[in-house]
Amino acid sequence: MTLPLPPASLLFSPVSVGPLTLHNRVWLPAMVTWLGTDAGDITDHVLSRYVRYARGGAGMIVVEAMGIRDVASGPLLRIGHDRYIPGLRRLADAVHGAGEAKVIPQIIDFLKIGRRDPARALARLEARYPGCSKWPEEVLSERLTTREYRDYAYGYRQDIEDLSIEEVRALPGHFASAARRARLAGFDGVELHFAHAYTMASFLSATNHRPDEYGGSAANRVRLAVEVVKAVRAEVGTDFCVGCRILGSDDVYGGSTLEDSRHHATALAKAGVDFISVSRGGRFEDAKRPTVGEAAYPYTGHSGLMCMPTRDFPDGPNLFLPSAIRRALRATGLSTPVVGAGKINTYAVAEGALQSGSLDLVGMARGLLADPDWPKKVLAGQEEEIRRCKYTNVCESLDRAHLPVRCQLWMKRPDGGMHPPG
């Protein structure tokens, strides 16, 4: 395929996403920075990070996941109370003032998780299994229930099956309230986080075995996500962009397949989302056992590798997922734009994916972290000057440790909030 020069490309042409018009199709997916305060507030370091992306020329900037409930969650950003609106407004205004990019927060709900503490877990089980604290590992795995052994070996983790029906039915309201705050803060829309290891993805997953109307069949599993979309839309109206991120595949045993995701995407598009961003994997089910004192991290197993493919993979290894989902939408007469991502870091791969109809917008997370000026350099014909991501996932290892996320290619600076020069 002969590709046009960047100025005449699809990549650098405008595109409509619901009520928004993006000046190009370079899409920055959400990446946690760990630059907020322990109370979940915006800091100057958060501002400088996203302003730097805006100056680089991306069409859409999706701000890292923000918790929708007013619960302690470390330096993860939050949007679960009106007191966060002033700080969020500072962020939206700063990004809008730095370039043409549109900016939306990713809003998320997550379940409780504890650090691995085998001694404490066994102490709790002593009444039911006298002497269990002295049993060898193989005996524990045989005598404990699957859930008991998991909580002993990996640390406590709440499941969606633990949620009462009242807790489930409260979730659409939490998302709607967060979206209202995003609108009041001046953002251009919201991305509903329905992917990876978190609450909503767990409802969508084929691993969801709830016995009520929110589990089991594909229609039941997508029910809550559709209710969230409808509640959010009712809260913010039709002139505010509302999209979602879903998994094209769980990549865990017994998890959702691409066919499940095609079904879910179609249902969500019919419910009124303005875009569907497709990711992959990143699940707890195949995570490695954490060390004592640490919590399980959902990007350490096979599904995590599929989510963030390393240098051992070819370019664009996950493109088949948005491509299949996009075909399913178009076959149903739906024109909802689809975002694809996963080791896309050259103009040839990005433009080729657009020209082939694999996606409508090009998600580029690690590539833009390495060089926020990627769009400007490509458009100017200076692709050889791009600081290329090495896909060794140093940034991911910092995320795992809850340290300020930065790229190994940046010049060394004492402040994790700084960006590369230029």
Image (cartoon, helix red, strand yellow):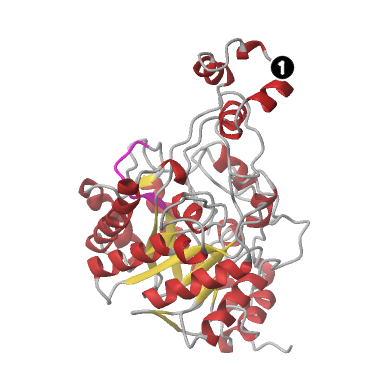
Can you identify the residue that label 1 sits on?
A: 136
Q: Which residue is drawn at 71% across and 17% down?
A: 136
Q: How far from the left and from the top, in percent, is residue 314?
A: 76, 65
Q: Can you name the residue that lies furthest to the right here? A: 312
Where is 136 relative to 301, above or below?
above
Give the main secondary structure of the magenta stretch: loop
Of residues 5 and 313, the one nearer the viewer is 313
Of residues 48 and 159, the one nearer the viewer is 159
Residue 143 visible, this orientation: yes
Q: Which residue is drawn at 65% across and 85% down?
A: 356
Q: What residue type is labelled 1?
A: Pro
Where is the N terminus found, in terms of image quarters? Answer: bottom right
Check if residue 68 falls in the magenta segment.
yes
Of residues 336 and 25, the one nearer the viewer is 336
Q: Residue at x 52, y 51 (%)?
A: 209
Magenta part of the chain: 65-72
Q: How far from the left and from the top, in percent, is residue 192?
A: 40, 61
Residue 363 visible, this orientation: no
